[in-house]
Amino acid sequence: MKYRTIGSGPATRREVSALALGAMLFGSVTDEKTSFAILDHFVEAGGIFIDTSDNYAYWVDGGLGGQSERLLGRWRRSRGVGDEIVIATKLGAEPLAPGTGFVDNPEGLSAKAVREAVERSRERLGVERIDLLYAHIEDRTVPLEETVGAFGELVAQGTVGLLGASNHAVWRVERARSLAASAGLAGYEVLQYQHSLLRPRFDVPSPLFQDGSLGHAGPELLGYLRAEPGLSLVAYSPLLGGAYTRPDKPLPADYDHPGTPARLAVLHAIARETGATPDQVVLAWQLAHPLPVLPLVGASSVAQLTQSLAAVDLELTDEQRARLDGAH
């Protein structure tokens, strides 16, 4: 395993595995025995960075979510896991009532909602302190100052270690960080967005966000990372749900544009050259990215996780990276 440092402050800086494990479907679609086996294998391989959210996976049973956090809590207790494993969770998108969702009825990011959601997550996970807490989605019904103050207070009182934001417009991330700095509070240091080798269109409407581009790490966000070396990007859906390797998994609609075939052709050529799978090449490309990018992979079996873990040891040449970067 390789490791990276996230966080820039002396009190918040943490070392994590360069590959993060997503626990979205653990305890719901993926049963407990399989979930425990995947988690155990990840830790045995040196993995120490696990990602979840308070609303995972509400859509499976039409409830409020929390299955993933509860499973991680049971796994921690059964394995005697302590502070050596960094668990990140998110708040703001848990539905307020069964049968609703985070588009029409989210918990939001008011100070009250933040405080209550954190207590629920701590109880489910069985932790005194949440290692990394994200604002999962934007809440433009609440003044940004209120959200920033609530998050900063959690760090100040020791309830949360690091702060992050996911699926936010870059200008709102920057404004939130500026407000936090002006108030002497901890601010967002880790960003979680969708990022992969293929580049999406940013003008495709999304039912999930006000702006279809908010979930993607586009040029503006990557430029922001370049200008702010204290930030890290956790890249979700790096393998596009299996679309790189599985014929039964079509690419999402926003990847249907003239640039996609050229990048896929180079990807498959380099996979043949290295003897690796296209998925492993994508992950290796991210792991060696000049920006601080940490791929977040999901797994529904130990075998699937093993395939992803092999990417950590795959070294692409400078020439191969240049071909991947230059294909368009």
Image (cartoon, rainbow, N blue to C red):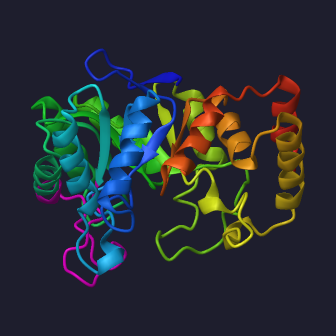
Q: Position of residue 316 (x, y in %)?
A: 78, 28
Q: Position of residue 304 (x, y in %)?
A: 56, 50
Q: Is residue 61 left or right of residue 117?
A: right
Farthest bottom residue in view: 99
Residue 170 seen in the current view: no
Q: Residue at x 25, y 57 (%)?
A: 143
Q: Residue at x 19, y 49 (%)?
A: 74
Q: Residue at x 46, y 28 (%)?
A: 17
- Residue 311 position by quadrant: top right
Main SS, magenta residues: loop
Residue 191 seen in the current view: yes
Is 135 contained in the magenta span? Answer: no
Q: Position of residue 2 (x, y in %)?
A: 53, 23
In this orientation, which residue lies closer to the viewer: 59 or 226? 59
Is 94 contained in the magenta span? Answer: yes
Q: Position of residue 322 (x, y in %)?
A: 85, 32
- Residue 249 position by quadrant: bottom right
**Which region shows up in magenta?**
91-114
Farthest top residue in view: 10
* Position of 224 relative to 240 (above/below): above
Q: Is residue 71 left or right of residue 254?
A: left
